[in-house]
Image (cartoon, rainbow, N blue to C red):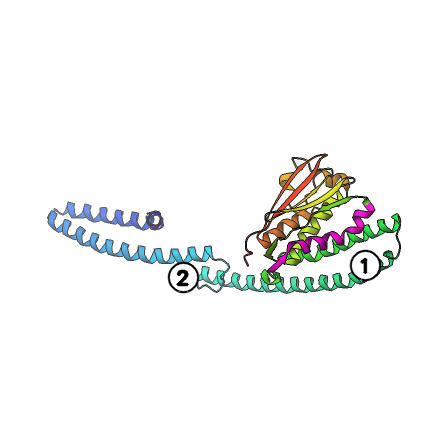
Amino acid sequence: MKLFLLFLKRYAASAAVLVVFSGIFALVFSLYDLHAEAVIYACALCAAVGIVIIAVKFILFRRDYLIRQRLIDEIGMLAQPLPEAKTPEQQQYNEIISMLRNECGKANSKYKTDRTEMLDYFTTWVHQIKIPVSVMYMTLGQYDSDEHNQLAAELMRIDSYIEMVLCYFRLDESAADLVAHNVSVDEVIRKCVRKYASVFISKHLRIEYQGTDLTAVTDEKWLGFIIEQLISNSLKYTEKGSVSICVRGRSIIVSDTGIGIAAADVPRIFERGYTGLNGRADNKSTGLGLYLVKKACKKLGAQVTVQSAVGKGTQVTVTLPEQIEV
């Protein structure tokens, strides 16, 4: 019904002209005292022909409308043919759209090429910068003092930021970077904890983790990245007490006894670049850590939630799906 009303609106001007012409003919016939039967018969014939024309017009209108609507719904299908032009104006519109398609295709191709080159550059940069970082780790590992532990902790932060750069670009890539298999969650967590061991030592913080036998079909690399970011955040905002990790069901829970997050900031902590009150006070926060965690969880089909209270600490829960969808 809605489509038919659009059709009537489209041809309202033509219908108005037809009504005016019919009125003129009726007036002329009445002035010449023609028989009513002749007038009625002529009107009936015109009405019958008009109904057929309207029906055909509506069928064609509906077909073209549905084609255009499909193009709107599937705008990414640039190869979809346009409806055949019926008028010079429609032909011009089709030519304009075809030119825009070509320009869009060129721009999209250039964007993909530039992005690939940029990703290749940062991938190479990350691997190259990791060499001196590894050498510094080995050098610092030969000494055991508070000063060296502090340097190792800062070096760990540098290493974490290097990984964050690469993950920032890779998160927007397609599922080609996603390798799902049966993963031992316990091994992933323990690997992340060992990575930040020097930071726990330098800050004199306890790490509490009892282990788990949970296995999940997921991507080990991205799951490790999520847990690393959560541990890194906890260490950044916790000066005393502990950081605990536990697994309940399919949920990985990372808790700390840090400064907590203001209630007004909690709904926005997953936004890119949002640092909140803590970030502004610390002046070191990039506002990217939890944003990347949220995107990585979406990539894995996982859910992430946060509970926090100022002065009491923060608890982040990552719930893994039963099965990852690629």
Residue 4 in the image: state x and y as whole percent. Answer: 32, 49
The image shows a total of numbered marks equal to 2
Whether residue 285 appears in this view of the structure is no
Q: Residue at x 75, y 61 (%)?
A: 126
Amino acid type, residue under disc 1 in the picture: Val
Residue 181's quadrant in the figure?
bottom right
In reply to whether residue 201 is colored magenta, the answer given is: yes
Residue 278: give x, y in percent of width and height. Answer: 73, 39
Horizontal and vertical percent position of residue 205: 78, 43
Q: Earlier in the sequence, mark 2 or mark 1?
A: 2
Q: Nearer the viewer, residue 265 or 151?
A: 151
Residue 264 horizontal side relative to residue 144, left or right: left
Which span is picked out in magenta? 181-202
Q: Can residue 47 be seen in this view?
A: yes
Residue that badge 1 annotates: 133
Image height check: is 115 above or below 196? below
Q: Residue 324's quadrant in the figure?
A: bottom right
Height in image: 275 above or below 157? above
Give the residue type that dot 2 points to: Pro
Q: Is mark 2 on a helix, strand or loop?
A: loop
Residue 60 in the image: state x and y as whole percent.
33, 58
Name the residue located 83 percent from the left edge and 52 percent from the top edge: 152
In-front residue for pair 135/319: 319
Q: How crowded is mark 1: few (under 14 residues within 10 Å), some or many (20 or more)?
A: some
Residue 229 located left or right of residue 158: left
Disc 2 marks which residue?
A: 83
